[in-house]
Amino acid sequence: MTQGTTSGDFTTTTGSQRGNGPSGVGNAVEFTRSTARGFIKKQLDQGSTQAGERMASTAQNIRTIGQELRQRGQGDAVAQLAESIADYVERAATYLRDSDPETLMRDAQEFGRKQPLAFAAGGLVAGFVVSRLLKLSTVPRYEGEGYR
């Protein structure tokens, strides 16, 4: 007899599915794998939706800057460039908001296969940006102690 309880995204089981014997261990491993995949997909979906919303807000800010430049008469070419960038960011935001995790992973893998150098360069740039952000976040904490 199998009894289970559900708490949030995780389900616990007792009885025959607990992992008694070799087949029970296999079931437990598969259950854990399935639960982890579901959790990761949910987190990726939430993260991509939030990133898409932030990007849409950024696109709107860029568009506003372009309109202000145009109204002031300070560079129509710069205003057009701002509009183009805003359109690109808006398309990326829509893609992130509307795509499911499987589509995001499939597209990233396909891009990595088609453009390996660009993919590696993007990873390098992302790693550099993250390292700089981490360094900036730790500077005030150690400033008084003579660290740099």
Image (spheres, grey):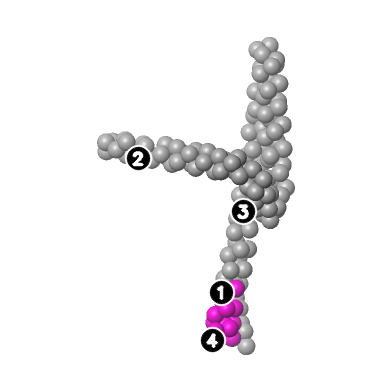
Question: Which portion, as a residue range, is magenta?
Answer: 15-30
Q: Are marks 2 and 3 in contact (CB under 8 Å)?
A: no
The residue shown at (57%, 82%) is 24
Residue 25: quadrant of the picture: bottom right
Residue that carries the numbered disc 3 in the rendered image: 44
The residue shown at (70%, 36%) is 90
* Cα separation between marks 2 and 3: 31 Å
* Cα separation between marks 2 and 1: 42 Å
Residue closest to the far top: 73
**Of label 1 and label 3, which has the lower sequence position?**
1
Instruction: Please rate how many residues cluster around mark 4, counting C-alpha atoms within 10 Å: few if below 14, some from 14 to 19, many from 20.
Output: few
Instruction: Answer yes or no: is residue 33 visible.
Output: yes
Tag 3: residue type?
Answer: Leu
Tag 1: residue type?
Answer: Val
Of tags 2 and 1, the one toward the viewer is 1
Tag 4: residue type?
Answer: Gly
Q: Which mark is residue 21?
A: 4
Counting from the top left corner in percent of width and height, residue 132 is at: 45, 37
**Of label 2 and label 1, which has the lower sequence position?**
1
Residue 71 or residue 74, whichever sits in front: 74
Counting from the top left corner in percent of width and height, residue 112 is at: 63, 47
Q: Which mark is residue 141?
A: 2
* Cα separation between marks 2 and 4: 52 Å
